[in-house]
Amino acid sequence: MDAARLAGRAAIVTGAARGIGAVYARALAAAGADVVIADVLESPGEALARELLATRAGARAVFVRTDVTSEGDTARMARATIEAFGRIDILVNNAAIYLDLERKRPFDEITVEEWDRVLTVNARGVWQCVKAVAPTMQRQGCGKIINISSAVAYVGTPGFVHYVASKAAVIGLTRALARELGGCNISVNAVAPGLVSNDASARLNPPEYLAQASQARAIRRAMVPEDLVGTVLFLASPESDFITGQTFVVDGGAVMG
Ligand SMILES: NC(=O)c1ccc[n+]([C@@H]2O[C@H](COP(=O)([O-])OP(=O)(O)OC[C@H]3O[C@@H](n4cnc5c(N)ncnc54)[C@H](O)[C@@H]3O)[C@@H](O)[C@H]2O)c1
């Protein structure tokens, strides 16, 4: 990893205390960015900040307890980033209800409360975090927003329609926000990962399903969180400055077109 690629940039990763978000935070720090870990999970979030400080020479890291559905928390997240690093260059909207989804169930068994909970965190939370950082990015005249969607929005995977709807909403939100913020040189893109073989997916899917997903890919192997890092770093870096409103499916070639 080129430690100078994102040197001097301040990045926020929501939902970074565990899972794929933690992998994004480590990669951004390794590329030289200062990182805010924003999550509801305090002790793993603080542990990751300590790990980044100990292992990434030069890069700074802080944990800010943030519920992405709370306006007070998202405002505090933005304030804390400016206090710690003086600016906000990159926002990775990764927080979502995924591992904690109720096991797969038919659409008519999902309760209104579950629907609202998933849509509120996964879609409204993205909008709220953008709202919180946009004034700073607008003042700076630049910014990179990367929203994490999912390939399920293309496949229409059954068993969690609320989750699928929330991840499709992220794609629409990405397009509209790209148009609203493009005038200030802020790019807004989305990444739609395929099924990653991690704890969350193992809890939600039987091993046969994960094996089947690998076979459905052009590149026939299990997908790991690190497969997503290159795209996220590219979208966070100046190399992608003229790309906005796009969704990048990273899934080894299962979904095409
Ligand atoms: N794992 C996969 O196969 C897969 C595939 C496609 C997309 N994704 C997406 O990638 C992202 C990470 O997935 P993961 O597998 O690491 O799942 P995960 O459930 O382990 O991680 C989600 C993170 O978000 C945090 N979070 C949840 N609600 C929050 C809230 N209200 N405020 C702040 N933080 C909150 C959790 O504490 C956790 O750290 C999610 O957006 C998920 O939808 C995952």
Image (spheres, grey):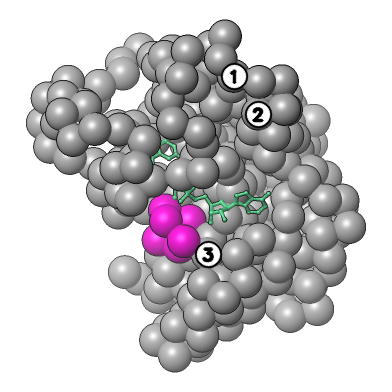
- Mark 3 — residue? 17
Q: Nearer the viewer, mark 3 or mark 2?
A: 2
Q: Nearer the viewer, mark 1 or mark 3?
A: 1
Q: Earlier in the sequence, mark 1 or mark 3?
A: 3
In magenta, the rendered stretch is 18-23
Question: Which residue appears at 34% of the width and 42% of the height?
Answer: 203
Is 98 within the magenta?
Answer: no
Q: Is residue 225 visible?
A: yes
On the picture, is 245 further left or further right than 231? Answer: right
Instruction: Classify mark 2: helix, strand or loop.
Output: helix
* Above or below: residue 156 compared with residue 217: above
Q: Place residue 177 in its image quadrant.
A: top right
On the picture, is 119 further left or further right than 230? Answer: right
Please, what is the dominant secondary structure of the magenta stretch?
helix
* Above or below: residue 134 compared with residue 217: below
Question: Which residue appears at 61% of the width and 55% of the height?
Answer: 14
CA neighbours of label 1 inside 10 A, class few (<14), some (14 to 19), many (20+): some
Question: Which residue appears at 51% of the width and 36% of the height?
Answer: 101
Q: Place residue 193 in its image quadrant.
A: top left
Establish whether ligand 1 lies closer than 8 Å to the Cβ of label 3.
yes
Per the model, the C-alpha gap separating discs 1 and 2 is 6 Å
Q: Which mark is residue 114?
A: 2
Quarter of the C terminus within the rendering: top left
Instruction: Classify mark 3: helix, strand or loop.
Output: loop
Name of the residue lying farthest toward the top: 108
Q: Which mark is residue 110?
A: 1
Q: What percent of the width, then of the height, locates residue 90? A: 62, 57
* Above or below: residue 185 compared with residue 164: below
Residue type (three-letter) at the residue carrying disc 3:
Ala
Question: Which residue appears at 31% of the width and 18% of the height?
Answer: 255
Residue type (three-letter) at the residue carrying disc 1:
Ile
